[in-house]
Image: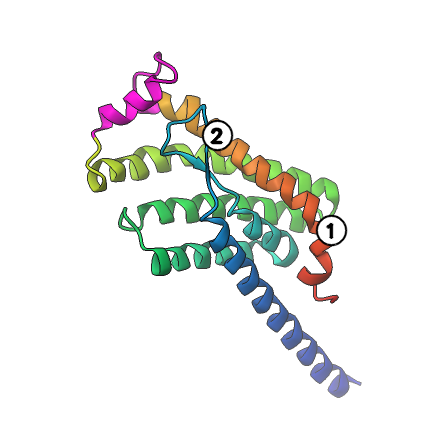
């Protein structure tokens, strides 16, 4: 019995691995395309734009596990650098990768512990919160210094763009707390809501039932 079971289990494992790789590649390609679809938000400075390119990674994290969500985030940003190029020495792509990965890992791990709709909702909310909180130090110490260096944009000019919307924000820290952290949380919520809306229709594809 054991001799027959082992090859069957091995074959099943290979099928699952192949399916996971195919789904990961597919979701990475979709995420890459979605990076090009971005919208300015009236209540944010013009250089801050909204996109939903973390949606495929969140789908992958729920369907395949958090590691696959991180892989999708990585491939998406590598494709962006290789095909479109980068104007910030990869800093913007690194920020995108890290933020998306934080959300996917948190959401995916919680869902792995409680594979139910409630677990998915809690995981998504925690993932959005983690991404929003960690976006502050990443923006403060990584992204905005890169804007100053690679775009030749004085920090005072950046703060001035925020002050044009809300004059009371007079430091980078305040700008990020008032604008970027809530924006990042809301961006994650949009991805999560879309994920819940399309997950069930896509489930046969994600889980190899079609």
User: Is disc 2 surrounded by few (<14), some (14 to 19) or many (20+) residues within 10 Å?
Assistant: many
In the depicted structure, whether residue 19 falls above or below residue 99: below
The residue depicted at 56 percent of the width and 47 percent of the height is 55
Q: Residue 23 got which mark?
A: none
Residue 23 in the image: state x and y as whole percent: 60, 64
Q: Is-magenta flag for residue 155?
A: yes
Residue 121 visible (yes or no): yes
Q: Is residue 52 above or below residue 154?
A: below
| 57 drawn magenta | no
Q: Quadrant of residue 40?
A: top left
Would you say residue 126 is visible in this rendering? no
Residue drawn where x is 39% and y is 58% of the image: 78
Q: Where is residue 193? Give x, y as percent.
A: 64, 39
Asked which quadrant contains residue 22, the reply is bottom right
56 displayed left or right of 209: left
Closer-to-camera residue (9/64): 64
Tell me which residue sits at (35%, 16%) in the image: 169
Tags 2 and 1 touching, CB below 8 Å: no
Vertical placement of residue 8 versus 92, above or below: below
Q: Quadrant of the N terminus?
A: bottom right
Marks 2 and 1 sit apart, C-alpha to C-alpha, by 27 Å
Q: N-terminal of the two: label 2 or label 1?
A: 2
Within 10 angstroms of label 1, few (less than 14), some, or many (20 or more) residues? few
Q: Determine whether, in the image, residue 200 is placed left or right of residue 73.
A: right
Find disc 1 in the rendering and name its residue: 200
Question: Which range is magenta?
Answer: 154-173
Q: Which residue is mark 2?
A: 183
SS type, badge 1:
helix
Q: Where is the C terminus found, in terms of image quarters?
A: bottom right
Secondary structure, mark 2, is helix
Q: Residue furthest bottom?
A: 3
């Amino acid at each position: 019995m054991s001799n027959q079971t082992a090859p069957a289990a091995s074959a099943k494992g290979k099928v699952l691995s192949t399916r996971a790789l195919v789904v990961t590649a597919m979701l990475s390609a979709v995420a890459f395309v979605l990076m090009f679809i971005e919208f300015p938000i009236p209540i944010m400075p013009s250089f801050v734009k909204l996109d939903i390119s973390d949606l495929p990674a969140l789908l992958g994290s729920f369907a395949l596990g958090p590691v696959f969500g991180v892989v999708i985030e990585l491939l998406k940003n590598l494709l962006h650098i290789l095909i479109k190029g980068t104007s910030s020495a990869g800093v913007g792509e690194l920020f995108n990768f890290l933020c998306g990965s934080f959300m996917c890992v948190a959401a995916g791990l919680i869902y792995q512990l409680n594979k139910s709709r409630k677990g998915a909702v809690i995981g998504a909310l925690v993932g959005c919160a983690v991404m929003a909180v960690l976006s502050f130090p990443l923006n403060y110490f990584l992204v905005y210094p890169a804007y100053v260096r690679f775009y030749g944009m004085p920090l005072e000019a950046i703060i001035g763009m925020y002050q044009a919307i809300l004059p009371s924000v007079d430091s980078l820290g305040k700008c990020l707390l008032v604008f970027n952290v809530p924006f990042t949380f809301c961006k994650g919520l949009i991805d999560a809501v879309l994920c819940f809306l399309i997950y069930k229709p896509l489930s046969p594809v994600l889980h190899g039932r079609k």
